[in-house]
Amino acid sequence: MIYPYSQPLILTDNIFVEYLGANALDQTSKEQRKIAYAIAEEFASDELDTYFTYTTVTGTFTPAQFAHPTKPLILEHAYVNSINLIRFYDVQENNFYTISGTANVYASLRNAERGVVDIHYLFGSCQCLSSGEYPYKIEIIYNTGLSSGTVSNSKRLLMALTTGANMVLNEMIGYGNEAPGLVGVDNFSSQDYSEKRHSLKNTVFGSSAKAQFVSTLLQGATKLRYVGM
C-alpha cells in the first residue's frame, strides 16, 4: 500500500542531535533533514508493517485469502487497534452484508499485534451461501499504528530512525564510508589494509553494515506474521 504521509511524524532536529551528537546537523539543510526523516520513517514503517501514528486503512481480500472456514485472515498491517467494518461484495460489486467492529460473535481480532482476524463465523450467520451469493471479495476497514508516545519512549526505535535518516542524508550529500545505495561490501581495500565481511542480509534500508544495525534495532517491534498461521 502507498505510504500516506509526506512529512515526518516522529523525528525532529532535537531528537537527531540527541542521538547523533551536536555536529549531526552540519552540512545539511532543514529541508534535506525533513526529507531524510520522512524517508527513514517510511522505511521503518515498511519493516514493521505499521505506521507511527494511528491510521485508518481499507483492505480488500479475495476468496483465496479467506474462503477456508477455519483459516484466519492476515491483514496488511501489524499492530491493529480496532476493526471498524467488514463488508461482503458480490461479483457485481454490490455490498450485500456488513458487520460493524468485533463486539459480536461474528468476527474477532485473534492477534492484534500480528493483525490476525477470524471471520469464519460470518459465513454461518450472514446467509451468504444459503442466498446463493458467495463473496467475490471482502473489504475490512481497520485502525492500525503505534502511538507517537510509544515510539518516543522507545530508545531502540528512535535510534533506528535517526540512524536510518543519517544514512539517507549520506546518500544526499555524499559523505561517510557506506557503499552507494547502502549496498553491503564483501571486500574492502585501502592502501595496506583490506577486509572481507561475512554475507549481509538484505533489509528495507539496504544490505550495508549500518542497515543491519537498524534492522536489528527494529527486531524487537517487528512481528513475524506469516509463520504458523
Image (cartoon, rainbow, N blue to C red):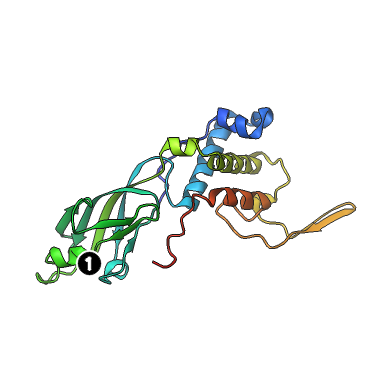
Above or below residue 73? Residue 165 is above
Q: Quadrant of the C terminus?
A: bottom left
Secondary structure state at the residue bearing disc 1: loop
Above or below residue 22? Residue 3 is below
Question: Given the current orientation, which residue lies at the most extreme left position?
Answer: 131
The answer to which image quadrant residue 104 occupies is bottom left
Question: Seen in the image, is 146 located left or right of residue 135?
Answer: right
The location of residue 216, given as percent across then percent down, is: 59, 51
The location of residue 225, given as percent across then percent down, is: 43, 60
Q: Is residue 90 visible?
A: no
Question: Seen in the image, is 27 located left or right of residue 194?
Answer: left
Q: Which is nearer the eye, 67 or 180?
A: 67
The residue depicted at 72 percent of the width and 62 percent of the height is 198
Question: Given the current orientation, which residue lies at the most extreme right position?
Answer: 192
Query: What kind of residue is marked 1?
Result: Tyr
Name the residue beneath numbered marker 1. 136
Q: Which is nearer the eye, 155 or 33?
A: 155
How many C-alpha atoms fall within 10 Å of the one at disc 1: few (<14), some, or many (≥20)? some
